[in-house]
Image (cartoon, rainbow, N blue to C red):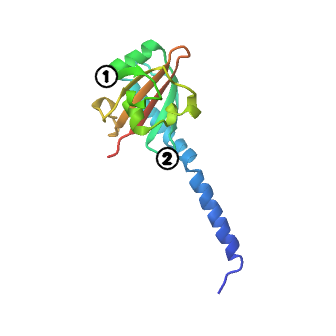
Amino acid sequence: MRLPGFPLVLKLLILLLSAAVAGCSPVWSAISRPSLEADVGEVLARGLQDPPGMECRMIGTTRSGYCTLELDGAGALAVAEGLSLESGNVDLQDPAGIPPAAAEGIVGYFSPEVMGSLDGLPAYWIGGRPDSLRLQNGGQFEYMVLILGPDTRQACVQVSYAYG
C-alpha cells in the first residue's frame, strides 16, 4: 500500500537532513562558545591577572577553537612566561616552525579567510598536552598558540581540547 504524498515526505526529509548536516558547524560553535571562552580565560589567567574579554569560535565541528582578544606585547610575554610557551614568528610557508599549526594544518585563525596574512607576526606556543594547559573541570588542551599583532594589539589564542 502506497501512502499518498510519500515521495513528497521523503523529499522533505532529505532536504531537512541536508540542512541539518550543513548547519552543524554554526550550531556546534554556538553551543561550545561559552565553555571555550571560560576555559581559555582560565588558562590565560595563569599569565595575566585580569585577562581581557574575548570572542571565541570553534573550528568547524572539531575539538579545536580560537579566541580573539586585545593584548599588547607585555601581556603576550606575561602569558608566554606564565605558561612556558616557546616563541617564534609565523611563517605559513613553513608551518613546522610552529608545531601545533603543522599538526593541525592551516585552519582556524591560521586560515587566510579568517585574518588574512599572519606571516612575520610573533607567535608563542606549547603542545603535547602539558600540565600548564590542564583545566579545573578535568579537561585539558592538547596545544595552545598565541599570535600577536603588535601594531594592532589584536591577538588570537588557538587551542584544541585533548581527547580522554
Task: Name the residue rendered at 39%, 20% in the picture.
Answer: 88
For this view, does 37 lie left or right of residue 113? left
Judging from the image, what secondary structure is the residue with disc 1 in? loop
Q: CA distance from mark 1 to mark 2?
A: 29 Å
**Mark 1 crowdedness (10 Å alpha carbons): few <14, some 14-19, many ≥20:** some
Would you identify the image quadrant in which residue 140 lies?
top left
19 vs 129: above or below: below
Query: Can you give x and y, in whole percent of width and height, for residue 8 in the image?
Result: 70, 71
Task: Name the residue rendered at 46%, 45% in the picture.
Answer: 62
Would you identify the image quadrant in which residue 38 lies?
top left
For this view, does 65 lie left or right of residue 161? right
Sequence-wise, the earlier of marks 1 and 2 is 2
Would you identify the image quadrant in which residue 122 lies?
top left
Give the camera-side residue of 17 and 114. Answer: 114
Task: From the image, tell me which residue sits under label 1.
Answer: 84
Mark yes or no: residue 68 visible: yes
Mark yes or no: residue 42 visible: no
Query: Can you give x and y, in whole percent of width and height, for residue 64 in the image?
Result: 44, 39
For this view, does 37 lie left or right of residue 84? right
Give the label on residue 67, or none: none
Residue placed furthest toward the left: 131
Quarter of the image with the N terminus is bottom right
Give the camera-side residue of 86 and 155. Answer: 86
Task: Name the residue rendered at 38%, 33% in the picture.
Answer: 100
Task: From the image, tell me which residue sits under label 2.
Answer: 61
Identify which amino acid the numbered label 2 is placed on. Thr
Query: Can you give x and y, in whole percent of width and height, for residue 119 in the image?
Result: 50, 23
66 vs 50: above or below: below
Residue placed furthest toward the bottom: 1
Identify which amino acid the numbered label 1 is placed on. Ser
Judging from the image, what secondary structure is the residue with disc 2 in? loop
Kindly check if marks 1 and 2 are in contact, taking CB atoms under 8 A apart as contact: no
